[in-house]
Amino acid sequence: MVGEGILKGMAETARNFFGSYVGKDRLTTVQYPEQRDPRIEAARSFPFLVYDGADWQQGMRCVACQICEKECPPKCIFIEKSKDKKPDANEKLQFYPAVFNIDISVCMSCQICVEVCPFDAIKMDVDYNLSTDDRFGGLLFDKQRLSKSNEYYNAIHPTESAVVDAQFAVERARQEVKARAATEARAMAATNAAPNTPAQPASSEPR
Amino acid sequence: MIQTIDQIFVIAKHWLLGYLPAGAQPLCSAVLSVLSIIVVFPMLFAFVTWIERKGLGRMQNRYGPNRVGPCGILQPIADGVKSLTKEDIVPITADHAVHFLAPVLLVSASFLDYAVLPIGRNMVIVDLNAGVLFFFAVGSLMELAVFMAGWSSRSKYTLLGAMRAIAQMISYEVPLVLASIVVIMQAGSLSTVAIVNRQAAYTGIWPHWFVFTPWGFAGFVLFMIAATAESNRSPFDLPEGESEIIAGYYTEYSGFKFALFFMGEYIGMFATGGMAITLFLGGWSAPLSFLTWIPSYFWFFAKLLTLIAVFIWVRGTLPRLRMDQLMNLAWEFMLPMTLLNIVTAGVWHFMPAGSFRWFVCSCMVIVPCILLSRGLKQKKKFQVRTYHFSQ
């Protein structure tokens, strides 16, 4: 009979129409500003810079090596290397970015900067509430706006940051061992060298 | 008392006119009637856009607009402000005069339709003795407006959309008019007021609406299908097929002109819905004899809102037709059915009243409908398509 399928379809839409007033579980919409879905760990929006400790300038992991700037496909990162050096997390003197800008209106959230960073200094954020009424200044993030603490990174990507922190701990331990070995060697050398200082040139004589 | 409430708008108008000099009265009477139409129906349009978005949302298990005002009731106002403040872009190669006139013509043509629609007892702007003819003649103006819009924008999408719209609207105008002929035959008049008066009578508690006869019911269904196509609504919204031609003939319109197109289409839809009510559903008359104490204009708008709800329901259900399906439906199914329906109405008129007349006329409608749909289904052959011009 002609129109049978149409009537069946009409019954289906009517069932959905009235069902949405009866069963609240049908309505899957999340009412955004009031309700939020739980944060998804694997989500990513735009990159941010990680810093250790309390001071964002002192603890900045970035050493301004500019690899991310070169690798960025849409060229949204702009870095200016500092003239002086500051100690990094491992107390080693490093350059730091004097200027670090990311234009998030250009960024395509590809995560390549994160993949290439050898210092685990740049990571992907999950914050998406970034709308602004200033489409130039409001979307150009400077160093201060990009800097976020390691605790924040731990909170948004727990699994990933655990691996990074473990690597840092191993590295730090190795550095410590090395440093201790160095000081011990220096001490040993000092104790050994102190009584017979003139012996040193003599020992090099056979070469 | 009931009489006064029923006629309150007519009385108010005469009371207002009483303060004017006799020479100015005919003109002011016309202006007052037109003003009330121009105020009421755009408000209904605003309300219906909200209802439609809510209803479609619920059919898809969404909330629909719920931010502006309680339950989103102020959404149309926000939309209006938005479209008014948007930049009005006219393509540099467009024909500026025609590009400007197209939405104006569309809206004015759709408003002209209301001149002959009886909204309540004694509430019609002009009681033309060729009212139905006037209605369809003015309705055809909308096709001109659509083509003006498509042609003057100087874009291939608008032109394709306009061509589709013209093909569709002209094809469906034939069954639309033929479906309404049965009512004109039965009422013996082209005047909409006479047609409604003919239906505003009761046997027991049941009204004499034309939809409660075999030919009237078939005519009503055919009229509604054709009216849906005529107002470019889903499932017949090919002229604005987003996936192929962006927005059809109003692709190049923005801001308030786009809003005018939107309004013109809805106002035209209400007008054809109002015509369906006038022809088949007894116009302003109450559905049961003991409900006549409720004012006549209430019944008209109640029926109109019911028809609009059906329009929305159909829109939420059916997918868009293909162009050949659209044309086949118009010429191979609707046209023979409307012609048969005219014969049925003639048979009904000349047979003595009784259940035998009902049986014969029902068979005359149902049997051809089944046979025709069966035949059209069997005629469909699936084969490898050959393209003549692309090789």
Image (cartoon, coloured by chain):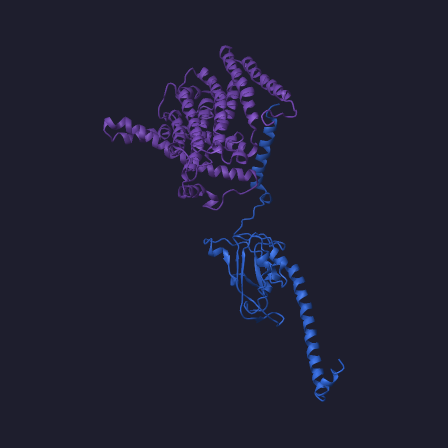
Q: Colour of chain B?
A: purple
In the figure, is residue B375 to the left or right of A196? left
For the residue pair B185 and B100, the one nearer the viewer reads as: B100
Q: Place residue B289 in its image quadrant.
A: top left
Name above or below for residue A128 compared with residue A198.
above
Q: Is residue B295 visible?
A: no
Q: Chain in blue? A: A
Residue at the farthest right position: A206
Q: Residue at x 57, y 71 (%)?
A: A86
**Residue B142 on image: x %, y %:** 43, 27
**Residue B162 on image: x %, y %:** 47, 29
Image quadrant where one finds the N terminus of chain A: top right
Q: Is residue B367 visible?
A: yes
**Residue A106 on image: x %, y %:** 53, 52
Q: Residue at x 49, y 45 (%)?
A: B66
Name above or below for residue B177 compared with residue A72.
above
**Residue B152 on image: x %, y %:** 42, 32
Image quadrant where one finds the C terminus of chain A: bottom right
Q: Place residue B381 in its image quadrant.
A: top right
* Numbered label tally: 0
For the residue pair B301 and B390, the one nearer the viewer reads as: B390
For the residue pair B199 and A1, the one nearer the viewer reads as: A1
